[in-house]
Amino acid sequence: MTSQMSTTDWQSGKEFAETNLYMLEHEIACDVTFRVGAEQTTVRAHKFMLISRSHVFSVMMCGPMAEPGEIEIPDVDAGIFRLFLRFLYTNDNTVKSNSVMHVLYLAKKYNTVNLQHQCLRFLNTSMTPENVCVILEQAKVFDEKPLYEKAMEFINENGTSVLKSPGFLDLSRESVLDVVKSDDLVIDEEDVFHAVNTWAERQCQKQGTAVTPEAKRQALGLVVKHVRFTSLSQEFVVKTVDSSGVLTLPEQLGIFHHYIITKDFVQNHGKMTRKRKLCIDLKLQMRQR
């Protein structure tokens, strides 16, 4: 391919980034070969460019532990790796919502700080109810606290649509706990219960276990303690919560005890405002379990 390109003037009038990209895409004078992804796709590049842009690549190719021959990159597919190389050659970050997390992973892995910043800016301005749970989870994996806080803020403001999204079902239990225990979550408590109950069922299915009340309760762990059961109507508790089996009998009695106390309070003192906050009596009941 190099000989075929030698008769074509692709340099004149072009910017540095343009000629770099042309050499990459047409494999002109490439001197390093990568085997990328599970399919071991061949991707060729230039040591000079990689070494000049990444200290990690510099160590891989120039240091005493330099890797001889072809370099394997098994943890991303070839398309994502080519997007990453495009940035190294041109500073052009063309990532989209379906690729940004993978590109951010490579930017972290090869310590390309500018690309990390571009990916994080993209994520901060591109949150939707459909992708925010993925962003929340990955922000925790990458230890990106500002991004995590931004995702939590978005979830709090859009609680109903987020908890009904497919992405919620793929959250880790730790992240589900962070969401459900938030006092700033704007959502009806019935929707909270439906979401965590469905999430627990999905966890059972993922683990290949029968969807039983015991299995769901084990999957939920501390999450169940942060559902505001006392904000639910008595009818919903009887018809929906009880039939789900996620609460023990003492916990159910604790909820109805709260209803009785609240009714007496209203009769004697007037209207009682309920907030997204656990009833202390119910919390104590659960701790004793």
Image (tube, rainbow, N blue to C red):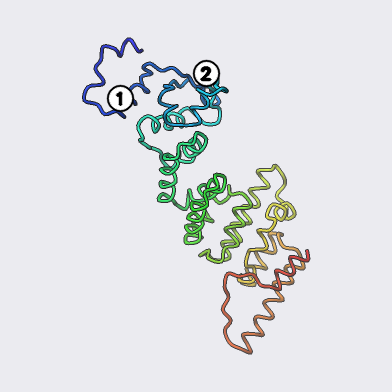
Mark 1 → mark 2, Cα distance in angstroms? 25 Å
- At label 1, counting other C-alpha atoms closer than 10 Å, the crowd grade (few under 14, some 14-19, many 20 or more) is some
Q: Considering only vertical position in the picture, is 15 above or below 279?
A: above
Q: Position of residue 165 (x, y in %)?
A: 51, 52
Q: In the shown orientation, is residue 207 left or right of residue 103?
A: right
Which mark, by number, is residue 152? none
Q: Residue visible at 52% across and 48% down?
A: 144
| Residue picked out by circle 1 | 19
Instruction: Specify the farthest residue to the front.
Output: 64
| Vertical placement of residue 22 versus 167, above or below | above
Residue named by callout 2: 70
The answer to which of marks 1 and 2 sits earlier in the sequence is 1
Mark 2: few/some/many CA within 10 Å (<14, 14-19, 20+): few
Q: Are circles 1 and 2 on residues that touch, CB within 8 Å? A: no
Which x, y percent locates residue 168?
Answer: 55, 51
User: Residue at (52%, 27%) from the top-left corner?
Assistant: 59
Q: In this view, does 193 lie above or below 14?
A: below
Helix, strand or loop at disc 1? helix
Three-letter amino acid code at the position of disc 1 = Thr
Q: Which residue lies furthest to the left in this view?
A: 13
Q: Which secondary structure, mark 2?
A: loop
Q: Which residue lies at the image location 51% right of the left edge and 31% below the top edge?
A: 56
The image quarter containing residue 286 is bottom right
